[in-house]
Amino acid sequence: MKILRIISALLASLAFLTACDHDEPRSLYFIGDSIVARWDLDSYFSGYAVYNDGKSGARYYYLYDYAGAMKDRTVVVMIGTNDMGSPMDDVRLRAMAADYVAAVTALDARRVYLYSVLPRDFSSDFAGKNDMIRRFNAIVQESVASVPEIVYIDVFDDFLRANGSIDRDLYTDRLHLSPSGYEILSKALLDKL
């Protein structure tokens, strides 16, 4: 009887350890575009095991490459700036936002921390791009509000000056981020974890 209790206790411990190893609560999987690819995750998230799947030039449909592959994991998504290449009316913007949200939910993650698309002022950007990005973010935020697995992190306004222009101190080239910009992203995520 004593041996059975020991074996039972060992099996219970093994089951617990296996569950913990499946996806440690302290693991974060980052998926996104060049903003994620350039993020020094080890510096900002030293208490976590971090995995960086950022890809320069990636568009939101890059998320479909991970469809179903993030089950039971905690994922951080920042993507979308490369999808804002041309002006879109609200009908096209809503259609893209619906597919964007579908791509995020297709990850099948236990938890997704989803960042808003950041404002930008790249040399080739068209007038009104940031207004369009703001509308896109609002549609996405509204769409994920009822999805308990998704935590939306709205940092759009944190990258603007009081006059509505981007805070150039937070960017290296008015598109990619400076260390100060990454500080804002990192703090916003750490506050939610």
Image (tube, helix red, strand yellow):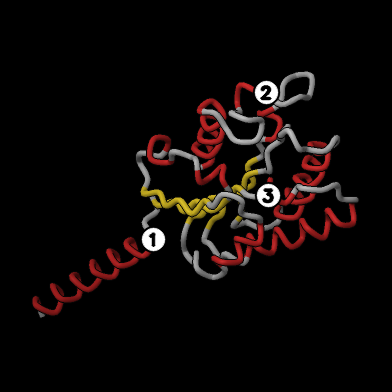
- Answer with mark 1 or mark 3, whichever residue precedes in sequence: 1
Element at label 1? loop
Q: Which residue is drawn at 50% across and 41% down?
A: 38
Answer few, some or many: residues within 10 Å of disc 2's Cα (few below 14, many 20 plus, some between 14 and 19): some
Q: Quadrant of residue 149?
A: bottom right
CB under 8 Å between callouts 3 and 2? no
Element at label 2? loop
Residue located farthest toward the top when viewing the structure as drawn: 162
Q: Name the residue under label 3.
A: 80
Q: Residue 23 carries which label?
A: 1
Can you give x and y, in whole percent of width and height, for residue 24 in the image? 36, 56
Q: Which amino acid does label 3 sit on?
A: Gly
Q: In which quarter of the image is residue 100?
A: bottom right
- Answer with mark 3 or mark 2, whichever residue precedes in sequence: 3
Front label number (2 vs 1): 2
Could you say which is closer to the camera, residue 126 or residue 180? 126
Can you give x and y, in whole percent of width and height, for residue 162 in the image? 75, 19
Answer few, some or many: residues within 10 Å of disc 1's Cα (few below 14, many 20 plus, some between 14 and 19): some
Q: Which residue is drawn at 29% across and 70% down?
A: 15
Q: Mark 2 points at which residue?
A: 167
15 vs 76: above or below: below
Asked whether, in this view, residue 29 is left or right of residue 130, the answer is left
Q: Which amino acid does label 1 sit on?
A: Asp
Front label number (1 vs 3): 3
Can you give x and y, in whole percent of width and height, for residue 2 in the image? 9, 76
Could you say which is closer to the camera, residue 129 or residue 184? 129
Can you give x and y, in whole percent of width and height, for residue 33 in the image? 58, 49
